[in-house]
Structure formats: structure tokens, C-alpha cells
Image (tube, coloured by chain):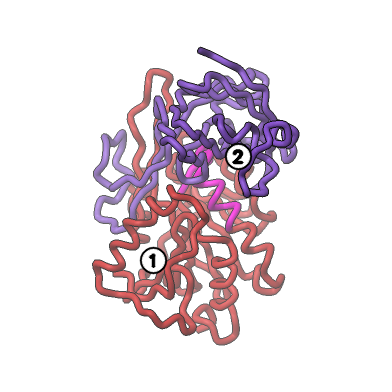
Chain colours: A purple, B red
Amino acid sequence: MKKTMFLSAAAVAVLAIAGCGSDDSSDDTTAASDETSVSDAWARVTTPTQTTGAVYMTIESPDGDTLTGASVPSSVAAEAQLHETTDEGPDAGDSMDSTGSMDSGDPMMGMHEVDRVEIPAGGTLMLEPGGHHIMLMDLAKPIASGDTIPVTLELEKAGEIEVDATAREE
Amino acid sequence: MFDRVVRRPRMRPLARVHAVVLPVLVLIVGSGCGSGDDGDRLNGMTRTPPTEVGRVSLPDVSPGGGGRQAELRGADDGLMLVYFGYTSCPDVCPTTLADLGMALKGMPDGQARRVEVGMVTVDPKRDTARALNGYLGHFFAPGRFASFRTTDGDELAAAESAFGASSKLGKPDRHGSYEVAHTAQVFAVDGTGKVLVEWPFGTPSDDIRSDLERLLSDDGAGSA
């Protein structure tokens, strides 16, 4: 069953109506406590020459769920992908050229697309710098501080969730 | 290997960051180094002996550099914060540069003026000089950064090797885009070409600022 919730990062009213019993005073959660909820959705401000961007947020799911995709309007970017930044050893993967030194003791960090990200029951998925994030490909225009980026999340159980990510420097 | 770690860097409250930093910490523990004495030590990581990058140089394509070879080290009384990254990196690189920018903004002007950020692109094919300068100009004031770019893979590899850094470009997909892996820490290099401290990804800007202020103080290592 697919349901669509129109949510905003500042939708405090939803919390009030739901009578959320949590003792967490956070006022930016986007859904009731017994449903998948999203909070602190934000996008990083980009430079004029950047063609990619990143969106971060916190997704909570009391019953567990799986994030399977995300999309943004074409006015924002050509495509949105689920990505994960990971620690990569110097010998991981295939190399297109040999610019790297293989005798380093310093770990490398790399980024790759993922098809799905699990949210354990009662758990929280943090889309955050250095971890999972939504990567915006081929930005239509630079993301400026204060911009609102509408993002549609696709979850296996909760269906589509629409959330507004606010752009900020960090 | 690493010898002085004052304390585990106070990372952002992000699980993934810990996952990334963990190998570094394991390395530290494995080397039998570290001390429980916080004393005057730095928040970042130091090595004994310190990494000496000497007079390693790369073309500086920033507006003031004119494409001439420039050394990856600080001025005589200053520091260069060297970072190997690329501009189409939407996550790790801007996070790191934003943290550096915040650290510098929080410092006294007199000290901040002695710090230059030097970014070496590990993806020169996509990172034109214009892209690199526009990218760094977003985070740092004009004249406070250097943009290093070489299309000579051997020259880049030699510079990376001097720092103990590395990078790797993945195979292009059907759209021609490719993934980039790179060493993510920032190296603070003094005027003699010595790496005084390294900050792994996720080191809070306050910790970086604190280390910079200590190094640039009259009795700090940076003034030695």
C-alpha cells in the first residue's frame, strides 16, 4: 500500500495533532511517533561551480523500513541517488589510473551508490556527512542558504514521504 | 606511526564518522602509542618522527599562483593546511572545508592570516582551475587559499606519497561518471615542510581551531 504524506521539516502541528508521547522536545519531527518520521532535513549549500549536492536527514521507523530511493524536481537536479561514503583501503576496487600511492597508512574515503538502506525496527537512519546521504546529480542551479529542496523519499512500507530540506552551510 | 594522541578526536555525533575514523584509531592502538596525559597535546594526530614533505611542489592554479610550481608548505611563520580532494565531491570534501573555514573564522585575525589552505585536486580531469578556484573561494577569502592541479599522474602520486596520502579513480560507468576515493585528513604543514598535525575527517572545527591557535602561539610548535 502506498501512501503519501506531505511533510515539512517544520511541521510542528503534526506532532501536536498526533499527541506524540515522546519526552523528546524536538519540534521538527515530521510525523507521529508510531509512523515513519523524518526530521532535520537539510541540504548543503553548494558553490557556483559544483554540479552535485547532498541532502541529509534523520529517518525514524518504529516498525522498521527500507529506504529504496529518493527524487527531487528537475528544477533542483537531474537525479537524486542514495549514496554511502565509506572507508576504503588503498587496494580496494579497480583503479582507472595509478595516481595513488599504495604504501600509505592513511585510509581513503570513497562514495558509491546504494540501492537500499535498512532502517531497523525502532531504529533511526541518519543520513549524515561521511555516511549515507542523498546525492543530487547535475544540479539545475547552485543551492543557496535558505533554499528549500523538496525531496520525495521512497520507503518499502511507508511508501512515499515528501520532505522539505532547508539549505544551510555547515 | 602515530605517537601522540591527546585524546580521541571529539567527532560529530555521527555513527558513520566513527566507522571511518576507527581504522585510524586501531592503527594508533596497534602501534602501542598514545597516552592518557592530555597535557599540552594537540587534538589531532601527530607522528614520530613527523612526516617531512620537504619542498614538494605542484602547479598552483589559483589566481595568485599563475600555474607556477609552488611548495606545499606554510610561510616561515605560518601553516599550510593541505587537503587532497575534488570538487564534485558533495559530502566529505565540503564538510571538511566548511570545518576548516569555521575554524579559521573563529581565530584571531593575526593568527588566521598566517594560515593558508592548499587543496590538491585528485581529479584534475574534471577539476579545471576555474572549478577549483570557485570551489575554494566559497569557503575561504581570496588570497587565503592555493589551488594545486597537475595533469601529470606521476607528479600527483609523488606529492601524495610525500604526505602518506593516496587517491584512486574508479572505472567510468556508462554515463562516463566515476567514483573517487581519497585520503580525507587535513595536513598542517609548517614553513620547513614538516607536518605538525593531521586531522581526520569529522574532527570538530573547534578542535582544529584550538590546535591552530596552539601551533601559532608564540611558544607553539609552529613558531619553532
Do tag 2 and tag 1 residues touch (Cβ < 8 Å)?
Answer: no
Q: Residue furthest bottom?
A: B219
Q: Tag 1, which secondary structure? A: loop
Residue B2 in view, yes or no: yes
Segment tinted magenta in the rendering = B85-99
Chain identifier of the residue bearing label 1 in the image? B
Of residues B223 and B4, which is closer to you in this image? B4
The circle drawn on residue B211 is none
Residue at the (59%, 34%) spot, across then down: A38
Give residue B151's position: percent from left, percent from top: 42, 41
Real-space Cα distance between discs 2 and 1?
Answer: 27 Å
- Classify mark 1: residues with Cα within 10 Å, few (<14), some (14-19) or many (20+): many
Amino acid found under the numbered disc labelled 2: Arg
Residue at the (49%, 26%) spot, across then down: A81
Q: Is residue B52 above or below residue B17?
A: below
Residue at the (52%, 22%) spot, across then down: A158
Task: Identify the residue position indicated by label 1 in the image.
Answer: B53
Of residues A124 and B175, which is closer to you in this image? A124
Task: Identify the residue position indicated by label 2 in the image.
Answer: B130
Amino acid found under the numbered disc labelled 1: Val
Give residue A136's position: percent from left, percent from top: 56, 29
Magenta stretch: includes residue A133: no
Of residues A71 and A169, which is closer to you in this image? A71
Q: Tag 2, which secondary structure? A: helix
Q: Is residue B117 left or right of residue A11?
A: left
Give residue B187's position: percent from left, percent from top: 46, 62
Q: Is residue B213 above or below residue A90?
A: below
Chain identifier of the residue bearing label 2 in the image? B
Q: Is residue B76 left or right of residue A120?
A: right
Quarter of the rendering containing residue A72: top right
Q: Quadrant of the N terminus of chain B?
A: bottom left
